[in-house]
Structure formats: C-alpha cells, structure tokens
Amino acid sequence: MRENPKGAATTARAVRRFRPTRDHLALAAVYALALAVRLPLRGVAAYFDEGAFHYFAIHYWHAPANVTNVYGYPADYPNYLWFWERPLFYFLMSPAAHVSFAAYRLLSILLAAALPVAAILVLRAWNVRRPIAWTTGAVIALSPQFLRWGVLVYMDPVMTLAVGLGLWSWTRRRTYVALAFLAAAVMIKMTAVLVLVHLFAWATLDGLREGRVRVWPLRLPANVVAHALAVPLGLAPYLYVYSFGYGFPGSTAHGNYAPKLVEMLFFSAYVIPILLVGLAWPRTRRWSLLAGLLAGSFLYIHLVGHRNVEDWYAVLPAYMSLLATALVFDEAANRARPLGKTVWTWTTRATPAAFAILALLLILLPASAAKADWTRPVSHLAEPSLAELFRSERARDQGYEQGVRALGPGPGRTVFVVDVYFSKVLHPVATSGGTIRYAGTWPPPRTADLGAWSSLVEATARRTLLEKNDHALNLALRDTYGGCTVYDEPAYQVIEGPRCAGRDAALRENYRERLAQGHE
Amino acid sequence: MRWPRGSDAAVAIALFLLSLAVRLPFLGAGHHGYEGAEFSVARQLGQEDTRVLYLENGEPGDAGPLFWVRPLHALVLYPASLFGFEAARLVMVAVASALAPATFRLARLAGASRPTALVAAFVPALVPGLAGAGTHLYPAALAAPLVLFALGERIRGRWPRALLWLVVASWIDETALLVLAGRLVLELRDGLHRREAKLWPVDLTIRQTAHLYALAPAAVFAGLHANIVSLFPLGHWGGATAATFLAEATLGGWLLVGLAFGLRSSSPRRWSAAALLLLAAHLLLAALGRAPDSSAALLPAATASVAAALTMESLLPEARRRRALVAAALLLVLLVAAVPGSVALKRTASPLAAQPSMAEAWTAARLENRDLEDARRQMDPTRWQAFFLIDVPWYHVYEPFHYALHSREGRFTSTPGVADVTRWGAWIERSDVVTVVAKNDHPLNRLVRETYGDCALHENPTYFILAGAACAGRGAELQRRWDETAAPP
C-alpha cells in the first residue's frame, strides 16, 4: 500500500510509512471474519434469479435445451441476451458452476468476503487512519446488508469488489490497471459505469484546471483518453444487447419506497449529513460526490423512471457511502488538530466509535420498533440482526426445496413444473438433468388446449410440481389430481399424475366450473 | 447556397424538371412497406395517441422512439402531413427530384466534364427503381441530396457548411452518419499525415474537432435506431432484398465495373471507395437480417454514378473516345428506363434482379397495396366514430384507418396475441365501430370471419370489413367456438 502522491486525498497529510505486518494481519483477520459469517449460510436455497445466473454460468448464451413448454416448444424466457448483458460475471463464475451449485456459491462467497479487504486497501491508500479503516472493514464484513448479498450469488458484490480494486489502483496512480478493473466491473454489471464516468469527469476537470485539457480544438492527455475509452469498452456488452432491442434492465416499480431506498443506498440515513460535510472539503469532495451520485442515480430511476431498485442494487452505493464516510471522519480528525488536544482526541476517537456503535446496533439488535426508530429514522423499517438473518435465510424456500426433492428430477426422467418462477426452474430443477416441461396457468388456456396438460400430467411426466395460486387451471389441476398428491405444503404441491390417469374430462369440467366462479 | 453558374445551372434545372416529371406519376401509388408508420410519426411528432390502443394490454403504440431516431425527417414532413398522405408524398417527390441535379453538381465539382456529369445524373433521375423509391416517405430519399450537396461544399473548401449539412442529413437518416464518420477518418488521416494532429494523447485541429463533435449526437440517434429496428425488424416491413438493393444501386451491377476500375486510378479512387463502402454497409446490415428499405439505394447509387463518371474521365483522357463512351453509357441508362423488364436481353444484362421500365414501374406502383386503398375507401367518418382492427399490420393502424375515420377511439389486435376473445366480440358488435380483419389462416381469424360473415360490409382478397352491430350477441358463440378449436399455441 503505497502513498498516493497525486490527489487532494493525500496532500493535506504527512507521508506515512507503510507497515506491512500489521496491515497484512488486519487484512487477513477481516477476510477471515467475513468468511466466518458467510460460510455457514452457503447451503441456503437459491433466491429469485440466482438459479438463472447459475444456469447461464454453465450454458452461457445457449437456451435451455431440456426445458420445453406444455406444448413441447422451447421455453423462451429468459433469453440469451441475459448472458451478453453481463458476460464477464458468467465467465468468471463458470469454472465453479461447472463443478456444482455449492462450488459456485463458495466461489462467490470467497470473492464477496474480499469486499472489506478491498475497502481497507482503498482507505489506507487514501491515508485514512488504521482504526477508522479497520472499523469500516469490520462493518462491511458483518453488516447484514453486505452479508446477505455476499452469500447469494448476485453480480453486485463481485462488481463492487472490482470497483474497490479499481479505486485502490486509481488512487495509487496505476491508471491503466484501475481502468481495466473498472471496465471489468462494468462488464460484470453496468452500474459500475457511474464510477467510470465520475472518474472520467473528474480527470477531465483536473485537466481543464491544470491546462492539460482543451475543448476547442480538442486536446486530451493520455490518462483522460484512457478514461474516455474505458467507458464504451466496459459498456460494449450492454450496447450489444441494446442493439438487439434489449431495454433498460430491471422491472417497473409499483409504489414508492424511496425512504427505504435512501437508507439502503447510503447504508444509513445518518451517513447523509456526513457526506454533505465531505462535499465541503477538497480531500473528501470527489468521493462524497461519487457516493451521492451512485445513491442519487438509483433514487432517480426509482422516483422519476418508476423502476424497481432491488435490495442487492444497494451493495455498491452503500459500500461507496461507507468508504466516503470513513474518509470524512479522517479528514475531520485532521481538521480538529489545531482546535486543541481535547477536541482532536474526541474527534479522532469518539466520532468513528459512534459510527461503529450504530453499525453494531444494526448488526446485533433484533428487529423491533425501537431499533427501527433509532437506526432507520427515515423509513422506520427495522433491519434484521445478524442472527435473525441467519434464521430467516435458512428457513427461506425450504418448502420449494423439499418439493423439488419430491419431484425427483434427474437424467432420463420427465417432470412437469407449473407456475413456478422460471429462474427457480432453471436451478435446481433443470440443472439436475432430465427433461423439464414448464408452464404457467395464466393467461387462462382454452379448454381445447387442456388435452396437452392432462396428457402431460398423466402420462408424459413422472411427477408434477405446482406452486399454488388462485388461477382457474391451477385450482382445477389440484382438485382433479389431488388424490395423487405425494407432497403438500402451503405453497407447493407435488402430484404423481400417472396414478390418476384418465381424468382429462374431469379436468375440463373442473376448469369450466372454476372459470364460471370468476377465477381467471 | 451557391448554384452552378451558366450552362451548368440550366442543366441542373432541366434535370430537376425531368426528375419531377418522371416522379409525379408515382404520387398516386399505394402505401409501400411501412410508409404508414413514417407518416404517422411525422404527423404526431412522436406523440402517442391514447385514443388508439392495443386491445390486449390497453397500451397505445409508442411512436416516441421512432421519432427520436430520425427527428428531422419527421419535422420536415410534419407540415405536409397535416394535409394528408398525398401531401407528404408531394414533398418527397420534390426533394427526391433534387437528387439528380445534386449528383450533376457533385460530379462537376469533382472534376467531371459536363456530358459525363450529365450521364451520372441520369442514373438517379431515370432508373425506374430509384425514381419510385424516391417518392416513398422514407428518410434516405430526403437525406441523399443533402449529403451530395455537403460533399460538393467540401470540395469547394467550405468545410463548416459541408459539416453542417452532413449533420442535418444524419439527423434525417442514419446512413449519412457513415459519410460523416468517413469524413472524420479522412480528416484525421490528413492531419496525421501533415503532423498537425495526434491520436495518443489526443491533440486535434479545429476541423477534426468539429467533425468529432458533429458525430457525437448523431451517434446517439444511431444507437436508438439500432434498438428500434431490432424491435421492429426492417426485413418484416416489406423492405427490399439484398439482391434488389444491389441491382438498383448499381444499375443492375454495371456500376460495379466502373467502381472496380475507379479503385485503380488515383483521382476517382476516393469516390469509388466511398460508394463501395456505402454498398457494403447496407449489404452487411442485410446479412444481419435488417433488409434495406426501398430508398436506401439512392445515396449509394448517386455516389457510385459520380465515381463511375470520374473513372470514365480518368481512363479515357482522349476526348473523342470519351464522347463515345459517354454516349454508350447514356444509351444504357435510357435502355434501362425504357425497355420492359420482360425483354430477354434486359434480363440477361441485369443478372442481379429484374429491372422494370419506367412505364412498368408506374403501373406497379399504382397497383401496389390496392386492397388497402380499397379498404380505406370503406372508412366512412359520417357512419363510424371508432374502429377495431384484427391482424392489420401495426404500421397501417394510424395511416390509413385512424386518419381516414378521424376516429374518436380505436383498438387493434392480433390473433397470435389474443388474451380474451369476449372483448373482441364486445368491440365488433358496437354500433359505432367498423371492424377490419386482415385475412390470414389463423383459426381465430377464420372464426371471426365465419361468425360475423353475414354482417360483412365489404371484402377483397386481403381485407374483410364488417359492421358487427347487426350481429350483436355472437360474442359468446365466438368465444365458445374458439375455446373448442384446436389452434397453434
């Protein structure tokens, strides 16, 4: 960890000598701590699109060949553009995904656990005091917000790690290495382009101030050109899928949850005034601005673009907010020195300690109204404690996992899955081998088409797994073949259809009745 | 804008009038491909009309992206579009007629003698395929004369003005972006050669900077365009095939010979290379499944004819032999325009694709989409205030049906996308609604025509028009029959 002789980040401070032994020990300890709290959760059920990501890491851009719809046509969702949108993530995860889902998870955990390490590296490169840097690392290692998405295999922690390493290299003036990390981060998930654009803008402004950049006629120094080229390079995969009609990723939001978002994106609402102070000081300005830019962009797309901002999107903004906050604390300590020893001591010790206490409260206190009021003053939504997160993650989707075990997919077997979210079909059902037939009961099919359903349930498929809902055909299937149920729990049901052969007419009759009752 | 003086001006005016004369008969042609969409985007300036919705999801067709990919094209057509489709066509005829004089002017400024330049100008003026394409409401026909004019300005050393016209052209049609990018590459090459500029780190001259900045906003439009055409593949819009495009852009392939020779001589080399690059770009897009629309051949054809004219000049410096070649070339163009496509010799001479004569092109244009015109005539605004369209291509929803009826509201749908047939019945049977079914073999399409067969108002080989109020109460029957019909999923 060499000093950064370039930016305002270091000009206000005397040069410190790097002590490899202490720093290395601290880095190893933080990594071990992060691993220790993540590894016990490695066996939890796949969440939301995690199954699809795993499938793409094995099969790349190829459509799932063993999944067809009820009529025998290839399943058309998700499509291959998902792969090309974020190819580097899938290539990176591919070797482990080919081994098993557990190995895939393990690789993701190993990478995500490096987030606090990268944070300490960045902060030390910014010449932040060790106690502040180490505390920040520990908070990232233990916070439920980072922990959950550090266990589930999503792009955001891996992308954030690449951003962290990019910022570390950038601060150390390894510009090309930094830009390679940042362009890679954009290819893992394009959110990171905001970091690249920010650094490009800042490098350009620096150049303009120093007379190295000229707008008319254009003159750009090599580092600014490199920044400018890294943006389209990183975005190339997304531009490729965009040219094929792929739109803005994510889904449309129903309702406004901006207060929750504010606290998620900034890690805590208490961070916001600290970042505002950071905007006033030259050393902290660019990083406070970057934290605000990241969080503000997501708020913008939610409030103005009416898009959903999922919980895992907040990993990078919250990470950047914590880094910028730590830097502001350090700068505050520097500025307190002339005010006398008492003030200086209070600032250097009490302020980060208070921040650490807030983080500890978030991590250790069980969810309650009081916790919500004090730790989440804007949204009043209590975060679970670390222990609660462990419990809830272990309990999540157990019904589905057992249902899949009862379904028994495997090589040489045909199974039928109804109304389950497609990513959850891709894993663990499709990756288990065999032939998968998949269908949804909405929009309601025509009665003339029910023959395909009944023959699939009764003859073609060994077993049928349904996610229960109130659609007419879902109810009719459960009524008609209820006597052949081999697994039943509140959300899922598994039917052994071949034992109930010959009920096509009953299914049609039941379906008509359900439609007549107003079910769709 | 400076016009060529003396005899050149007279020739240019004559060429304009000649072009106008051969294009005016195309005014009454039927709708070609997705022209209706270009017209409605211009007429509404990209604003969606919430009165006209897709029945299955209740959302209006969003024309905004289509407007923003080619904003100046819509703006130019907007005033005329308020007066109707034919008025917009008239604007296109007038603008496209300027292509021949622009070609003549460019060839003259590039160094061609008057007779050779005249032959070059006869290609866009008289080749039937190009004449017809120029009258369609597609943007390439509008942008091509501007590009040629800009290149002429560049030759005269007025690069800021040339750049301005290229920017305007690229905001009309993204093809001009290729020319703009080509100009930037040439400027950079020249600057690097003269050691006035550096690429790493970047240190550009004013001229290069201006070209770079001019390219940036247009690239955004091109990016939008890439996204839009992938949503609405051009090949599905009745666009030309690659062979037709190449045949029209190269005079049945003969201009390629001129371009090949042009690459060997120093003076026409740049023009030949430019024409070949334009052709290659379109063919590449066609290979990627994005077939060019009918007017895409205009700019490559005009550029290729200028290059071929300059090649003639450079290969045959001796005046007498050159005059003979010019006469032969002129004869070839006239033959292409006059000889019917069915003549065996002409088919042999144009191996890439059949080239009709001008008279045949006029006739074909008048016969194009007659069934649509016939259906449009049945839209009586005094009788109906709303419409329901089944399987009618989306680019015909506004033009002609919505505009012909001045309708208060309208719905369109498609048989493969059906969610709830009962809603179809409700719309068909409304007393203020006229229903238009574009016939196809989908079982539901046939069921609609059978169920409401005795309420038919009019029928032609493509469209089935019905007033469903007289058949009220058959929605349930349609639903029942559809429910029991085996159909492709």
Image (cartoon, coloured by chain):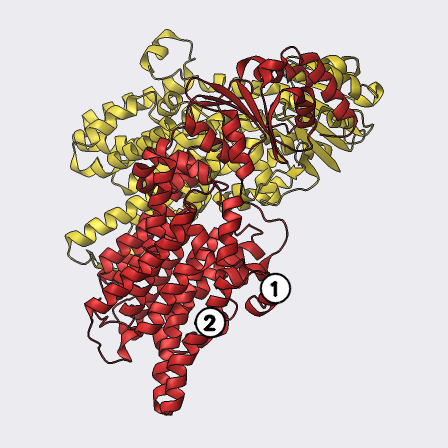
Chain colours: A red, B yellow
Percent x, y of residue A432: 42, 27
* x 31%, y 56%: residue: A228
Q: Quadrant of residue A375?
A: bottom right
Q: Which residue is mark 1?
A: A380
- Asked if residue B473 lies left or right of residue B237, the reply is right
Report the residue at 58% width, 57% height from top: A303
Q: Nearer the viewer, mark 2 or mark 1?
A: 2
Q: Is residue B281 above or below residue B242?
A: below
The amino acid beneath tag 1 is His
> What quarter of the picture does the C terminus of chain A occupy?
top right
Q: How far is the residue under mark 2 from the one under mark 1?
A: 18 Å
Q: Is residue A355 left or right of residue A182?
A: right
Quadrant of the image occupied by residue A288: bottom left
Judging from the image, what secondary structure is the residue with disc 2 in? helix
- Residue A10 drawn at (x, y percent): 27, 75
Tell which residue pokes out farthest to the top in this image.
B344
> In the figure, A277 relative to A207: above or below?
below
Question: Earlier along the polypeptide chain: callout 2 or callout 1?
Answer: 2
Question: Observer-nearest residue: B154 or A413?
Answer: A413
Q: Is residue B390 left or right of residue A245?
A: right
Chain for disc number 2: A
Residue to which mark 2 is pinned? A357
Q: Residues within 10 Å of mark 2 (few under 14, many from 20)?
A: few
Q: Residue at x 52, y 52 (%)?
A: A309
Q: Residue B276 occupies which quadrant of the picture?
A: top left
Q: Chain of mark 1?
A: A
What amino acid type should be assigned to the residue bearing mark 2?
Ile
